[in-house]
Amino acid sequence: MFVRFLPVLFMILSSASMADVEADREAFRAFYAKRFSSIPVEAHVDGVYALDEAKRAQWLEMEEFPPYEFSVDDGEALYDEPFTDGSGYGDCFADGGAVKHLYPRFEGGEVVTMEVAVNQCRVQHGMESLAYDSEEMMQLTSYIAYASRDQLIDIKVPEDALPAYERGKQFYYSRRGQLNFSCSHCHMQIVGSQLRAEVLSASYGHVTHWPTYRLKWQEVGSLHRRFAECNGQVGAEALPLQSQPYRELEYFLTAIARGLLLNGPASRK
Amino acid sequence: MKKVLFLLAVVSPIVMADDINKGRELAFDRSRGNCLACHMMEGGEMPGNVAPPLIAMKTRFPERSVLREQVWDATIRNPESVMPPYGRHGVLTEEEIDQVVDFVHSL
């Protein structure tokens, strides 16, 4: 009797879990919609510039001569350069690289981010993989982000990816570091208020615009580099770029951002 | 005996003022207390506004020990507090916490 219903039970359980991702997404949207009732929840793709008029004006000025433009152009040239076996990125990615809205994906039991996919493509075609913090990787992902602009995030969390999603979610809500902050403390609980002169932005929309040129970095850098900085500033261990926990964190944040517009690369202070 | 009492009376306010000064330094220092990241405090530049301004502290915390506990580990009273547990996580030494508390209590 029990055995007969086991598959049904399993289906119910697993579909309930997938519905949880959707419920998390709804809860995130509802949270920020309530906290910032005067702005559309989709506006958070501009980060802190959705919240602060004066900072927004300065930022729009900076965007008139986008500081990531060279990175996009150099990235396009790299993207079009054939590999030594005559193939190229076009053999791995469709639509001229306008594929960012489909990443991260869950493949072969792990979260495959855009950066990881670029390296997988290279290795498949006999090329060496690139360091995740290399200029070349930033240029390629700048180009891919640019080619993917205006696509809507469209990732799905298949059943076998749920544990990775859950770990990412747990990372987001866990206190860490000497100062004992979770991501959610700064980017939800006290979102919109000021730490010294820094206004805290919403996590909803944190993944739409990478890589990003930051004045502080004086160059284009990745989402994981920003994760590392946020970890570091509370005295927590900054993990390596593309380490499993950061990939899973990105996966969680992207899954709950499904439907948001991609607007990378971007510039930030 | 009289002499000792006299000395104490003169010396202790000086020690106190010294502690308050050290406490102020720690409170304003970005890499130590950094209270200004979240709290407005008299004399501090570029304060944040995450948490209430630190004013009238003797009214709000008549008991110094309650204020000290708040600095040592704010999650004792409020598990969801975002205030760093300066004592529990060893961000500041016990002596430094006393200095910060003396300063904050004076506001």
Image (tube, rainbow, N blue to C red):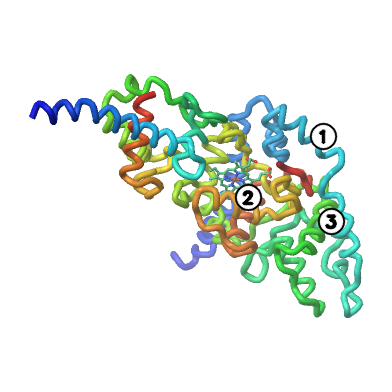
Q: Are marks 3 and 2 on the same chain?
A: yes
Residue wearing tag 1: A61
**Residue at position x 88%, y 66% in the image:** A90
Residue wearing tag 2: A253
Measured in 3D between alpha carbons, the distance from the residue under mark 3 to the one under mark 2, in whole angstroms, is: 22 Å
Q: Position of residue B31 (x, y in %)?
A: 50, 45
Q: Chain of mark 2?
A: A
Horizontal arrangement in the rendering, residue B70 relative to residue A2 (left or right): left
Q: Which circle, 3 or 1, is nearer the viewer?
A: 1
Residue wearing tag 3: A143
Task: Please tell me whether mark 1 sits on a helix, a strand or a loop.
Answer: helix
Horizontal arrangement in the rendering, residue B11 relative to residue A74 (left or right): left
Horizontal arrangement in the rendering, residue B51 relative to residue A206 (left or right): left
Query: Mark 1 is on which residue type?
Result: Glu
Q: Which circle, 2 or 1, is nearer the viewer?
A: 1
Residue B85, above or below A57: below
Tell me which numbered mark, 3 or 2, is placed earlier along the sequence. Answer: 3
Q: As rendered, which of B57 and A53 lies closer to the eye?
A: B57
Task: Report the label total.
Answer: 3
| Residue A160 at least partly seen | no
Categorize mark 3 by other alpha carbons within 10 Å: few (<14), some (14-19), many (20+).
many
